Amino acid sequence: MQPIQQPDQTQREPLKPLTPQQLDQLMALLDEWSADESGYEEETWDNLKNAIDQKHTQISDRRLSN
């Protein structure tokens, strides 16, 4: 039986609000992403979802996605 690993105790800085410039950049990125009609997301989503679930299964017994 392996010992239970404790969560990382590293202190993390609290999240800071985005600046107006960062918000503009984020909105531009989201606009570009939502306008993309290449089909890339549809082609890769199942692979990405499976990889996330596989990694999560190594940590927990519960799947992240349905």
Image: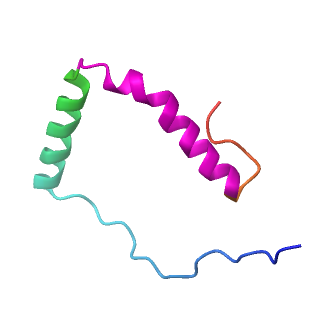
Is 45 in the magenta?
Answer: yes
In the displayed structure, does residue 34 sit left or right of residue 2? left
**Residue that extends furthest to the right in the rendered view of this protein:** 1
- Left or right of 42? Residue 49 is right
Q: What residue span does the magenta drawing correspond to?
A: 37-58
Q: How is the image coloured?
A: rainbow
Q: Nearer the viewer, residue 23 or 9?
A: 9
In x, y percent, where is residue 30?
A: 23, 35
Q: Residue at x 45, y 29 (%)?
A: 45
Where's the C terminus, which quadrant? top right
Residue 24: which quarter of the image?
A: top left
Magenta span: chief secondary structure: helix
Q: Residue at x 10, y 54 (%)?
A: 21
Q: Is residue 34 magenta?
A: no
Q: Residue at x 89, y 73 (%)?
A: 1
Judge by depth and name the residue closer to the eye, 27 or 44.
44
In this rendering, the answer to whether 39 lies above or below 62 is: above
